[in-house]
Image: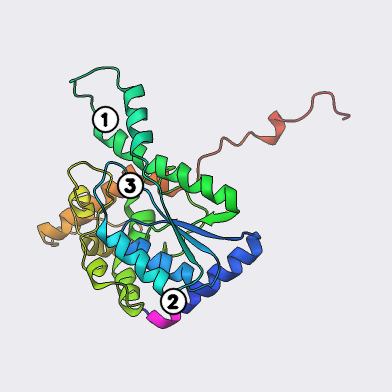
Amino acid sequence: MINEKKVINYIVTWLKKYIKKSKSNGFIIGISGGIDSAVTSMLLAMTKFPTLTLEMPILEKKNLLSNQHINFLKSRFLNVNHLKKDLSTLYTTFYKIISHTKHKKIKNQSLSLANTKSRIRMITLYYYANLKNYLVVGTGNKVEDFGVGFFTKYGDGGVDIHPIADLNKSEVRLIAKELNILNSIQKAIPTDGLWDDKRSDEEQLKATYEELEWAMKITEKKKNIFINPSMNLEKKNIIKKYKNLHNKNKHKIIPIPICKIPSFLKKNKNSLQ
């Protein structure tokens, strides 16, 4: 169990130190109406540094949870400002450009388009971040970012800092309760909002966050974990699911591989011996 008050104070202090060291003017964060972005934006606001919340709907109806949280933040913090930019036209224009065939199903197109939405939001965040010399703040938690890689590479994974990426989803929920985040957001079903059918995170992952957290803790303790024959089938399947997702998305989790050239190959032939 975590000490919620101490963790909150630690993150807020860390944010203050980081922004001063970076010589940035403030923070910018995308608001989705979910618990992760709600908690993170609240922590940013608590630093007293300028905090810009950005709503970026793409072919979506009005997001009531997002609006409620923004109003909640602005009623409590004078340093919070808000922008809403509808990116639907930008997305549909892109879709028309890349859509070569009509009425033909293309493999992986739905996934590609979902990731495109996330990347369009990322470039919008950085546009305003560059204008104001702000830091783009990520909202991913530990099991998403370092467990199963449940984020879009160079989309919602394209950020400057990750304040809650060392907290599991269950811990984020405890922090949300301590911060008095709106109850409707605390109880909302987690979703990335990138799919036309409004599928939830857990429907995509085919496991609950609690199950994935359990599997992550088990595999972290036992690096060379094997499936115990005596383990019940349900637990075996959860561990297999976690390991498959972790291995599949490892390219997102680890630093970008660099081909390091041996020093003897870079030696100047014309240099003095």
Q: Determine whether, in the image, residue 105 is placed left or right of residue 141.
A: left
The span from disc 1 to disc 2 (Cα, nearest Å) is 40 Å
The span from disc 1 to disc 3 (Cα, nearest Å) is 20 Å
| Image quadrant containing the N terminus | bottom left
Magenta stretch contains residue 145: no
Q: Name the spot of residue 154 as percent of width and height, x first.
A: 44, 42
Whichever of labels 3 and 2 marks the residue nearer the N terminus, that label is 2
Whichever of labels 1 and 2 marks the residue nearer the N terminus, that label is 2
| Residue bearing mark 3 | 57
Span shown in magenta: 4-8
Q: Determine whether, in the image, residue 259 is placed left or right of residue 212.
A: right
Whichever of labels 1 and 3 marks the residue nearer the N terminus, that label is 3
Q: Amino acid at mark 2?
A: Ile
Q: Determine whether, in the image, residue 220 is placed left or right of residue 123.
A: left
Would you identify the image quadrant in which residue 174 lies? bottom left
Colouring method of the image:
rainbow
